[in-house]
Amino acid sequence: MSDINFSNKSVSGIFGDQKLSKLKGWESYTTGLGGSPKVRLGHSQGVPSFDHNTVSIDEPLRTGRFIGVWLRQPNFFHDEVRAYFNYFFQDKLLEVSGITDNEISVMSKVMGSVGRTEEYAGIYKENNGKFTLKVPEVKGSPVRKILKYYVSGISDPVTGAAHFHGNTDLRFSKVNYGGDFLYILLGPTMRPDDIEYACLWVNSFPSKDFIGHLNSGTIGEPGAADLSFDVEFSGSYVQNNAVNKLAQIVTEAVGLYKDTVEDIVLPSYIYEQYLDPANVEALRLQFGSNIKQRLDNAGASEDADIMGSIIDSYPEVHSAPTDLTIEPGSGEDEAGTNFNIN
């Protein structure tokens, strides 16, 4: 994969300045070691240093900003389930957890007449075959239904068959019932050159659905407004330079660092009724710039012609019809019952 050039500024995270490029694993480096050893030792003991590198290398690592993306979902998912799965298990993610420390095993043997123990390095072992996604549950239980759909497609609760909800073109394999999840821990700037850590779990799948929260509770108690599930997935953990490059591409595509308060979208009627230049005169009549003008406008509002001109200048606001009826959809659907709104 060809290199991707991003900002070359000194920022926190593993994707800062390109330094020590010939040292494997240090292709992306944060800051240089500034000052003398005496200055650095004094700084660690509370003697302040104002050397920029000495100060910047002590910037705390921050968490709480992250991106979770399902690069691939299970092949048997119906399109509607796929859309809801993306919404809750990607866009509405509250937390990613379960990452544990990797370790190298140690061998030991007893030496000499005094029985001194000598230790030797063994084999490096990567753990992290499981990860947990905290997902909010809401009215209508969409998350519970997604998980029931998922696990029952892998194994039917009555027969145990892997029917994939009617998809007969798929053989039973982790590739077909698992998905690929990319986790990216962002630095404070949320730029693609400010990523603290990224890893990938391939062929990941959950092992349970949730119904334990559906007990009635004490009469009169409304329940919890912040109900969420910790959904554990099993998958194959991957962390290497290719995953780091992939994380940069995804972070740039998501573009969180480009969003500001000015990009917040207001309700659509505000743009139509208030921010449309064609309605400025009508708004001036209705919301005068001073109290006298507003009082005059209030008296003039009795004039039907003026009031009518104000109302006519507003674009029509469409409301939902009041005669909604919900009926079960006709025909068999592999994803379950459809509902049509007439």
Image (cartoon, rainbow, N blue to C red):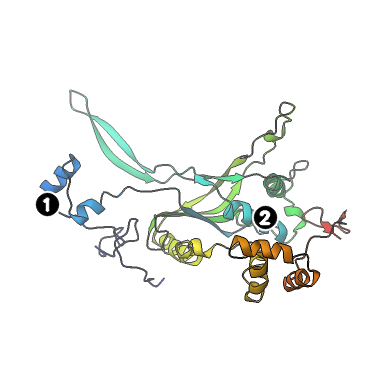
Image coords of residue 4 (percent x, y): 39, 71
Q: Secondary structure at mark 1?
A: loop
In the displayed image of the protein, which residue is found farthest to the bottom? 278
In the image, residue 230 sits, relative to residue 56, either above or below, namely above
Q: Is residue 333 left or right of residue 14?
A: right
Q: Identify the residue at horizontal 65%, vertical 41% (top origin).
A: 208
Image coords of residue 62 (percent x, y): 38, 48
Task: Kindly identify the amino acid type of the residue bearing the numbered disc 2.
Answer: Tyr
Q: Quadrant of the N terminus?
A: bottom left
Task: Kindly identify the amino acid type of the residue bearing the numbered disc 1.
Answer: Ser
Q: Is residue 236 left or right of residue 166?
A: left
Residue 84: assigned label:
2
Q: Quadrant of the C terminus?
A: bottom right
Task: In this rendered view, identify the residue nearer to me: 7 or 337.
Answer: 7
Q: Is residue 85 visible?
A: yes
Image coords of residue 187 (percent x, y): 39, 55
Q: Residues within 10 Å of mark 1 (few under 14, many from 20)?
A: few
Q: Determine contact: label 1, label 2, CB under 8 Å.
A: no
Q: Identify the residue at horizontal 68%, vertical 71% (top origin).
A: 282
Q: Secondary structure at mark 2?
A: helix
Q: Identify the residue at horizontal 58%, vertical 63% (top origin).
A: 290
List the residue tagged with mark 1. Answer: 36
Image coords of residue 204 (percent x, y): 57, 51
Distance from Cα at disc 1 to Cα at disc 2: 56 Å
